Amino acid sequence: MKKTIFALFALLISNAALADPTVFGLTISKTKVEELKNKYSVTYKGQNKYSGGDMYEIATGQIGFDGLNSLTAIFSKEGVLIAVLTGFPKSKFDYLKSSLSNKYQLVSQKIPFVGNKSAKYKDGNTEIELDAPHMSFEMTMNYIHTDLLRAFNNQSASEERAKKKKESSML
């Protein structure tokens, strides 16, 4: 009996640990475009270069989160949410970092006394990144599925190689 209870408890904990993160009522890898449109009034922003899916901007007044300046939802070709990109005043960095630290696993952080501040968290297949550039009044908090990160990194590397090849041929 004890083994059964322990196994059930372990299963519940492991499922909770692998749950997809939810931000502002939107769950990465779960929310569909139709659900977003039913929940919020959105503005279509085009097709994402890296995912091939649609992007939508959500007016921040609908969210009710102090300091939220911008919010963009990015979907896969299949219409499933794979990223939520947000903008905040840089003064929110410590508050957001503290909130995220209580919820997600910290992967890395760089918080110098002066300079760019950043923190990266992981939850299942999603990376949550805070980035506060030193010479800016704005910061970002982004929830991005690893599939989109991989596509971004692959395409960026390919574009960089093409640029270098083009420049090299000009010499």
Image: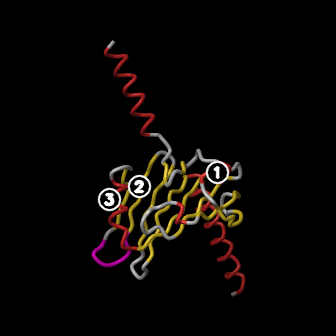
Q: Work out which residue is located at the far left of the displayed protein and give it.
A: 113
Residue stretch in magenta = 112-117
Pick whichever, 107 or 30, lies toward us.
Answer: 30
Nearest the eye: 109 or 70: 70
Which is nearer the N-term, disc 1 or disc 3?
A: 1
Relative to 167, is 83 above or below? above
Q: Mark 3: few, some, or many residues within 10 Å (few <14, many ≥20)?
A: few
Which secondary structure is most common in the magenta stretch? loop
Vertical position of residue 25 compared to residue 91: above or below: above
Give the residue displayed 42% in from the left and 76% down from the top.
133
Residue at disc 3, secondary structure: helix
Q: Residue at x 39, y 79 (%)?
A: 134
- In the depicted structure, whether residue 107 falls above or below residue 171: above
Q: How far across and how far down the image is residue 146, in percent?
A: 55, 52
**Whole-Å distance between the Cαs marked 2 and 3?**
12 Å
Q: Amino acid at mark 2?
A: Tyr
User: Label 3 is placed on what type of residue?
Assistant: Ser
x and y, in percent, of residue 12 in the image: 41, 30
Residue placed at 30% from the left, 73% from the top? 112
Q: Upstream in the sequence, badge 2 or badge 1?
A: 1
Q: Which mark is residue 38?
A: 1
Identify residue type, mark 1: Asn
